[in-house]
Amino acid sequence: MRHLLILFLAALCFALAQEAYYPAREGLAWTYSNGETQMFEGVKAVSGQSAQVLVHYLQGTPISEDYLIYDGNGVRSIGTAAGGQTLIYSPFLTFFPAPPLAVGQTWSSSAKVADFDISINAEVVAVRGVQTQAGRFNALQIRQQTITSTGAQTVLDLFFVPSIGIVRWLTQDGTSIDLIDKNF
């Protein structure tokens, strides 16, 4: 019995540490300078899995949902829904590996979705001071390249702060999308 209690407590501590690193509780919300708000709105069964639902709002109107799993493998996406269509990744797409992240760390993930393939290659390139309307942060700068079999390619720099989330996106053309508010 004591061993079971120790295992349970270890699993609970791991889950809490994971949650603290990659925040994902129902009701958490982030608002960005492009007018988008992202909010966790509960759990939904998707493709036989229990997923956190991250709803994306633009000027208050829901435009899409991401179905995410937070576990010992990090943050993985089961799929996404927009315009009445749900797309499932096979296998699930890893957005972030298990914590903690460190400068120099790289990861890749590939999946098939609908009629095309998608690949993400990412690297933690630096720790940077980032000032936004929501505050000043020491953020991990993650360079993320996304490539599809249809020929589409994007490179984004994500500025991620453990226990906060993404505080800035920087696009290839230099556009900066900043966190302006969060509710936690």
Image (cartoon, rainbow, N blue to C red):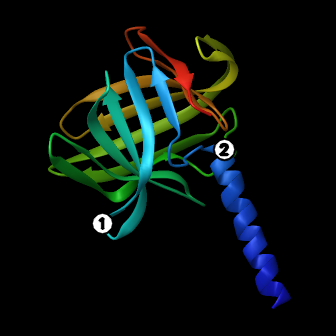
Splitting the image into 4 quarters, where does residue 10 fall? bottom right
Residue 30 pos. (x, y %)? 50, 29
Residue 95 image label = none
Q: Determine whether the residue tagged by mark 1 lies in a helix, strand or loop.
A: loop
Quarter of the picture containing the C terminus is top right
Which residue, given by chain and number where applicable, does mark 2 sit on?
21
Q: Position of residue 81 (x, y in %)?
A: 24, 46
Left or right for 164, reference 57:
right
**Does the image show residue 99?**
no
**Residue in the picture at 60% in, 44% down:** 22
Q: Is residue 56 left or right of residue 11?
A: left
- Give the CA distance from mark 2 to mark 1: 26 Å
Task: Tell me: residue 82, above or below residue 144.
Answer: below
- Number of disc labels: 2
Name the residue beneath numbered marker 1.
47
The residue type indicated by label 2 comes to Tyr
Q: Residues within 10 Å of mark 1 (few under 14, many from 20)?
A: few
Q: Is residue 144 rendered to the left or right of residue 10? A: left
| Horizontal relation, residue 114 to residue 177: left or right | left
Please rate how many residues cluster around mark 2, counting C-alpha atoms within 10 Å: few if below 14, some from 14 to 19, many from 20. Answer: some
* 50, 161: nearer the viewer: 50
Nearest to the observer: residue 35 or residue 99: 35
The amino acid beneath tag 1 is Ser
From the top left corner, tell me how far across and down residue 123 is, in percent.
56, 34
Residue at 38%, 15% in the rendered image: 34
- Rendered view: 137 above or below 86: above
Whether residue 4 is visible, yes or no, is: yes
Q: Quadrant of residue 1?
A: bottom right
Locate residue 56, reporting x and y percent: 35, 34
Q: Quadrant of residue 46?
A: bottom left
**Residue projecting furthest to the bottom:** 1
Point 79% across, 81% down: residue: 5
